[in-house]
């Protein structure tokens, strides 16, 4: 099983990043010197993906601008002094084919994936949420793909999450534990309350899915599905129709870039491990202990600091 295509849904509203996300996609938040979209595209390429199908919407034009691969940009990137800085970008745009699908209204993750159905044939494909950053020696998506190949089935990524946070996630019910990190899934529940959650294994943003998901989403679209069509509901319905689903605890470091705090943790975590910045960032973080009062309080610089 080769996985040549992956969908990156990037048409969400980003309400947790408002008002920033009103004008600039949260998928384009910088992590050190590159936007979040760059890292997910790198992971896709390293997993063997060749076609990236990005679902975009209003105010998301900068994503296309970033991956624009005109001759002029390529030449600029290859001019003396720029090659090093642009090496990663060039590697992406020369090896990946980008297509864009419009989801004109953010009607949910399931709807975003459904919007790209015309670009997927009768094949397994990847889904990668750009606001989940997975840093791992073996690319996150490749870890799923290996299971999908072995089992000839759909695979999702999961992570153990403390009970009180489970209501923010889709959660799996384990049918069978195959290895310490691999499970066959019985069913899925979207945002369960902590008492009724069937496990503490929460779904995170990497999937390898059968094209059968589109039929399942079609059916759900015809029913009343509330204001958003959830991908979890589509996958649950696909399992009921006989598709096998496995879940793998992905190894590596995962950062949730969907909230300002998660993004901040990713930025600090990455900077403090990057040889270009590590020494100075760690020194800076250490120096914060000696600041004895808050000079910045919920969006306001305190007066004494302004003088
Ligand atoms: P999220 O639920 O994290 O993103 O979706 P969101 O809806 O943009 O953020 P909040 O909850 O309002 O703060 C995960 C990914 O799916 C995309 C988002 O762009 C994000 O990359 N998405 C979500 C879509 O493409 N379309 C949608 O309708 C919803």
Image: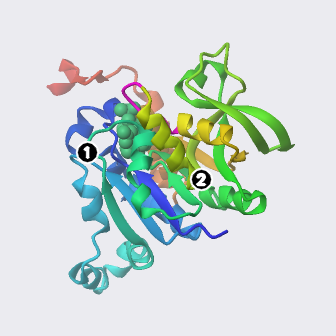
The residue located at (38%, 57%) in the rendering is: 54
Q: Give the overall secondary structure of the magenta segment.
A: loop
**Camera-nearest residue between 144 and 72:** 144
Q: Tell me the crowding category of disc 2: few under 14, some 14 to 19, or many 20 or more residues within 10 angstroms, Cα based.
A: many
Residue 228 located within the stretch drawn in magenta = yes
Q: Which mark is residue 72?
A: none
Left/right of residue 127 with respect to residue 112 in the rendered view:
right
Q: Residues within 10 Å of mark 1 (few under 14, many from 20)?
A: few
Residue 18 lies, with reference to residue 134, above or below; the image says above
- Residue 172 falls in which quadrant of the image? top right
Magenta-drawn segment: 226-231
Q: Is residue 56 above or below residue 77?
A: above
Residue 58 x, y percent position in the rendering:
22, 46
The way the protein has been coloured in the rendering is rainbow
**Residue found at x 48% / y 35%:** 220
Q: Quadrant of residue 184 in the image? A: top right
x%, y% of residue 212?
57, 51
At x 60% / y 37%, what residue is drawn? 237
Q: Which residue is mark 1?
A: 104
Ligand 1 resides in the quarter of the picture at top left
SS at circle 2 = strand
Q: Residue at x 66, y 51 (%)?
A: 154
Q: Is residue 256 visible?
A: no
Viewer-proximal residue among 161 and 296: 161
User: Residue at label 2?
Assistant: 209
Q: For the N terminus, which image quadrant?
A: bottom right
């Amino acid at each position: 099983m080769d996985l040549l295509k992956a969908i990156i849904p990037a048409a969400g509203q980003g309400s947790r990043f408002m008002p920033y996300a009103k004008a600039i996609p949260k998928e384009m938040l910088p992590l050190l010197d590159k936007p979040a979209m760059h890292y997910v595209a790198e992971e896709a390429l390293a997993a063997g993906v060749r076609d990236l199908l990005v679902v975009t919407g209003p105010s998301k034009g900068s994503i296309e601008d970033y991956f624009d691969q005109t001759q002029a940009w390529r030449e600029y990137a290859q001019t003396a002094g720029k090659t090093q800085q642009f090496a990663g970008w060039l590697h992406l745009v020369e090896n990946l084919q980008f297509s864009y699908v419009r989801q004109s209204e953010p009607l949910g993750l399931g709807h975003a994936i459904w919007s790209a159905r015309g670009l997927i044939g009768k094949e397994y494909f990847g889904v990668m949420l750009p606001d989940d950053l997975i840093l791992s020696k073996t690319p996150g998506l490749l870890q799923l793909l290996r299971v999908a190949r072995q089992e000839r089935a759909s695979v999702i990524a999961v992570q153990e999450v403390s009970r009180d946070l489970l209501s923010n996630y889709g959660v799996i019910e384990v049918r069978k534990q195959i290895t310490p990190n691999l499970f066959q899934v019985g069913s899925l529940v979207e945002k369960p309350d902590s008492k009724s959650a069937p496990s503490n294994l929460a779904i995170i943003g990497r999937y390898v899915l059968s094209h059968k998901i589109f039929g399942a989403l079609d059916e759900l679209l015809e029913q009343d599905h509330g204001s958003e069509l959830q991908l979890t509901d589509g996958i649950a319905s696909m399992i009921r129709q006989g598709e096998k689903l496995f879940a793998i605890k992905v190894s590596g470091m995962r950062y949730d870039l969907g909230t300002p705090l998660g993004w901040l943790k990713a930025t600090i975590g990455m900077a403090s491990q990057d040889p270009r910045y590590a020494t100075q960032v760690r020194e800076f973080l250490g120096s914060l202990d000696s600041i004895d009062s808050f000079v910045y309080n919920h969006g306001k610089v305190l007066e004494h600091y302004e003088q």
